[in-house]
Amino acid sequence: MTVWFSPRKLFGVPINDILGLVIVLVATTASWLLSFKLHTFQKLDLQDIFTEGAILLFLIGGFVYIARLRIRHLKWGWLLMVLAQLINFLDDFTSEPEFFNTTLEGIALAAGLALVMKGFSDAYRGSQQENELQKKLRQELMLTLNAIPVGLIKIDDKFRIEYMNLAMKKILGLKEGKEPVTIGRDIREIPSVKELGVDALFDYKGERKTLSVETPFRSLYGRECYISVAANPLVQERRFLGGIIVVTDITERKKNEQRILYLEGIQRCILEVLRTIVIEKNRKKLLDKVCETLTQSRGYIFAWIGTIEENTRRVIPAAWSGQENSYLETVTITWDETETSQGPTGRAIKTQKPAVVRNTAEDPSYEPWRSKAQKRGFASSAAVPLIYENRILGVLNIYSAHLDAFHEEEIELLEILAKSLAYGLHSLDTEEKRREIARALKCSEKHYRTLVQTLGEGVVLTDPDLNIEYANPVFCSLLDCKEENLVGKNLLDFINVSDWPKVKSQVRGEEGEKASCCELQVKTSSGDLKSVRATCTLMTDGEQEGSKILGIFVDITELKQLEDKLRKSAITDGLTDLYNRTYFNERIKEEVERARRYNHPLSFVMVDIDNFKEINDRYSHIEGDEILKEVARQLLASIRKSDIAFRYGGDEFLLVLPETNEAGAQMVVQRIQQEIEVINGIRKKARKPSISLSIGWATWEPQANRKWQDVLKESDLKMYQDKMSKKCTSRASKKSLYQKGTAPRAGAMPEKTAI
């Protein structure tokens, strides 16, 4: 709909120009008619009057059009021509004076024509400059698009390619001089793209809705990768005009995610082994269970645990699982100085450090076992010693079907598993000694005391009411008390109150019944709590049945700390100390259920660091890691204790805000932006790259008919739109500089912008 009038314009012409024209016409007419004598009606030539009047109206209409062009010389020149024609028109009614042998009409007309020619000349030069500027802008835009590491394709409403940048050509695998994809070709006809079903991403043609998908992709020349495809339709009045397809190569991200999942799987395997150590009391079953867990849960094709013989210096298999096929019966492994000790098992025992063979077919040290290993598909091997208090109890051997397996992170996790297993074996050995002590007690009190005094675990003897009668040195050291300060006191005084029911349930059994075991917390003389594994057994004292209670206490504080550390490493990102995506998958179910139960809103805030790859490339990965940690600190500083922060991906973070509506989420975003502004001021003084974040948020309402997963995707999409709007704003700002005449001179370096 055309707007003919506005407070500042009339018919598209500035009001000032209209008023100026009217004033000139009225003033000239009035002064002319008052200054000169009018002709009589008989002397008037009506034909000339109508002709001159028509020309005057034509020139006035031309002025209205020219005034809209805003060409100064052309506008003033045309106004003089209107004035000249007005004088010519008025001359039909009066006598016209002459100046320097010419009429006033001629003077105005000559000046007007001169200004009109000048105006046309300026307009022509301006048009040429604008064309050159547009050409330069197009060239810079092409250079910018080709420099973007993300693939871009512009298509028309028939899915024909209109533009494709260099990154997209690289993803498709196009080679110079051999490009089967050309401008104007239907993108759906490209075989590798056809499999993606690009047209399906534009199902919502009538809506401005961005759809995306992550999928494996094979280029035109066979390169396999993983890509993210985002389809952005161009719609006007619900009519599909084409679209922009943004393609990102996410192969490295997917590899990292798979690596993280792989390591998390090892961590879960270690937790399973720890549970087995706590539950299983039979040494052979424990070792078998560990081998089965490694081969069944982690996909290793073979695992075995060997014990060492001091006299023969041989490694004897104690347990195994997987594709063994008599492998251990056909090989000899030692830890002496012979050829059969140069493999990973022998090196692990002698150095007390893990040993790895990444390629059994080429590693010279694997020669004695190469042929047998190759027949069974053993491509790589690792050996981890089982060490407890500098004493080797055995060695864990693992085999993989993949070359170059057992990287540093995996070996570190396997070392934790080996330490835990060594501790479990030591505990079982201690338990066996305890059984020997229990049997010896029936024979000799003297023998009992000798054994108990030398036992490496805490031993306490009480009456049926749990009053302490004897405590060995290890138990006294455990509680940091002297024996004389323990005897006569009740055992429950040194046990955490919450664990009393466990102790009382253990001492209700009968003599000869299998000893029960439980985990407790004991209190030292300083008030500290220590974790122990306690075993209580009813004993006979002469002819009285069940008159004594024997308790064995094993200090497992270190094991508990190891479990806590492992649990924390399994759910925490090691760089930022934020929770990782694995913990998000566990925790989100609780938060959604809590929000649904109490009918409270739950908000998601997705945060992404802009230009993070450029920071790594330009300032090194060390600076990139510092920025990740800085962003994590600011996110934690901007949220409540009840809110949860996650490192969701490489440079992506996620905030989960319970009991927070849309306005509350927006306030959190504002706090984050304020914190980042403060940090950027500090970083600028230190000459460090500034931090820019793209943020999107959305709120899930329990009563709304939406899935929380869709709301999470919405926050991710808003974050992506925020990132894209910044790029568009940057390009628009650069274009406006040229339009305002403030473009940098040729050869000048552009100003650096904040990263």
Image (spheres, helix red, strand yellow):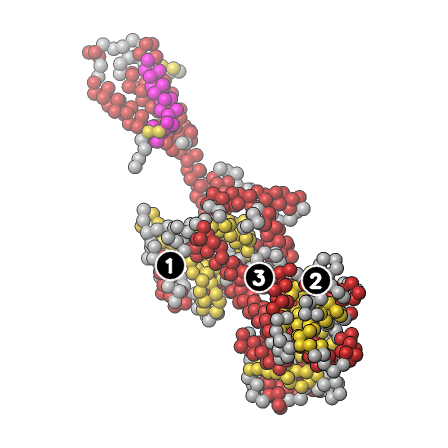
Q: CA distance from mark 2 to mark 1?
A: 68 Å
What residue is pinned by disc 3? 571
Task: Specify few, some or many for label 3: CA neighbours under 10 Å numbering under 14, 14-19, or 20 or more.
Answer: some
In the rendered image, residue 612, in percent from the top left (x then y), is placed at: 57, 54
Residue 152 shows up from this direction: no
Residue 91 shows up from this direction: yes
Q: Amino acid at mark 2?
A: Phe
Mark 1 or 3, nearer chain start? 1
What residue is pinned by disc 1? 201
Horizontal side, residue 526 vs residue 663: left or right? right
Please report the residue visible at 56 percent of the width from the left and 56 percent of the height from the top.
Answer: 647
Up/down of 524 relative to 299, above or below? above
Residue 15: say if magenta.
yes
Q: Which residues are magenta?
A: 7-30
Q: CA distance from mark 3 to mark 2?
A: 34 Å
What residue is pinned by disc 2? 494
Residue 384: say if magenta.
no
